[in-house]
Image: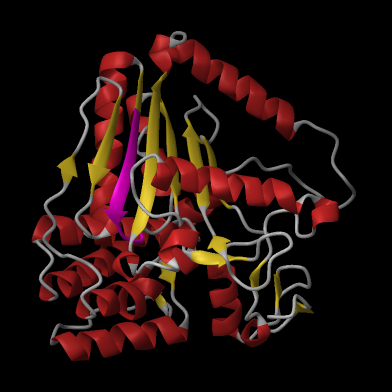
Amino acid sequence: MAVNGSTVDAGKLADFSAKALEKMGVPEEDARLTARILVAADLRGVDSHGVAHLAPFYIRRIKDGLINVKPQIKVISKAPGTAIMDGDGGLGFVVGYRAMEEAMKRAEMTGAGFITVRNSTHYGAGAYYAMMALSRDMIGISLTQGGVGIVPPGGRGKGVGLNVISVAVPAKEEAPFVLDMATGVVAGGKLELAARNNTPIPKGWAVDMEGNPVTEVAKATGGILPLGGTPQLGAYKGFGLTVLVDILCSTLSGGFTVPEMNRELSARGKSSHFFGALRIENFMPVEKFKQRMDVMIKAHHNLPRAAGVDRICLAGEVERETERKRKSQGIPLHPAVVASLKELAEDLGIDYNL
């Protein structure tokens, strides 16, 4: 049963999600992997990329034939340190996991491994794949197309990808550095959360079709602004990062960039990714590097703070604390998410035991 009303146990949530995916024809191993990655996002407080998307996004796309539940994933090129992977339209979680494993395998042999992926689908929160490298004493890199969502500087309406950059770096005693960012002013999931909670969005996040700033999600028809917001404040930097991610994920793999997808029906529902792993031991002893990371992190913590600020946090620290809390106290789910999971259980004929 749910703890504290809408707070659920992570293990039970993963089991439920896996059963739902299996009912849709996803093989057990792939279903459990996908469920684990979804719940990992909820544990870290990234609620926009967790089980809230299970029924309305992933299950729906499987029903619509946009996701291949039994893909024949292939490695196209086999250079020692690099490769192209074709995901055969499979679940992005499964394709992404295998691609990151492939990158780390190459890094073990050569010191650095890079895999670019085409013909995949949405893979959830990017940090998960970058963080896979932490236990292997590697630096992990994960990039992905996030779908059309950003207004290019000088453009009108959504035209380029709301793409994602994730990097994970291990430390010794301190929390690992885990950067997980969209190339927009804000991630698209933040608008979803605002809509779910019926709250306004800050001015400067998104615009309507005429380019006017809006504070209501329903009026954000023009798209999200690139990181920087306006050209005067550095929008071309965010736009540049967006295109760079697309180059590494799509152009390099032979896939479709986001603007190309808009014209190609064959690319509907598809996504491309890029993964990298750097073996720290090939640069310096791992222990020495981790000690240096701790020193660097503490130096940032000790920077002068503005009035009312208790702590300067580096990327990944808040999420780590949230994960520790939710592992012991459970994952809070919004009533709308609970309702979607109950409806999914009834639709698929599985028990709702959260």
Give the side of residue 351 with respect to residue 340, left or right: left
Give the side of residue 197 with respect to residue 59, left or right: right
- The residue nearer to you, when weighing 270 against 338, is 270
In this rendering, the answer to whether 32 lies above or below 242 is below
- How far across and down, in percent of the image, does residue 264 sit? 37, 67
Q: Please state the extent of the stretch shown in magenta in the rendering.
A: 114-122
Quadrant, the N terminus: bottom left
Give the residue drawn at x 30%, y 22%: 81
Is residue 1 visible in the rendered image? The answer is: no
How many callouts does the rendering have? 0
Image quadrant where residue 155 sits:
bottom right
Give the residue drawn at x 38%, y 38%: 275
What colouring method underlies this structural image?
secondary structure
Residue lying farthest right? 307
In this rendering, the answer to whether 303 lies above or below 18 is above
Image quadrant where residue 294 sits:
top right
- How far across and down, in percent of the image, does residue 151 sit? 65, 65
Q: Predominant secondary structure in magenta?
A: strand
Give the residue drawn at x 44%, y 76%: 333
Give the residue drawn at x 54%, y 43%: 244
- The residue nearer to you, when weighing 207 against 12, is 207
Query: Within the magenta stretch, is there residue 294?
Result: no
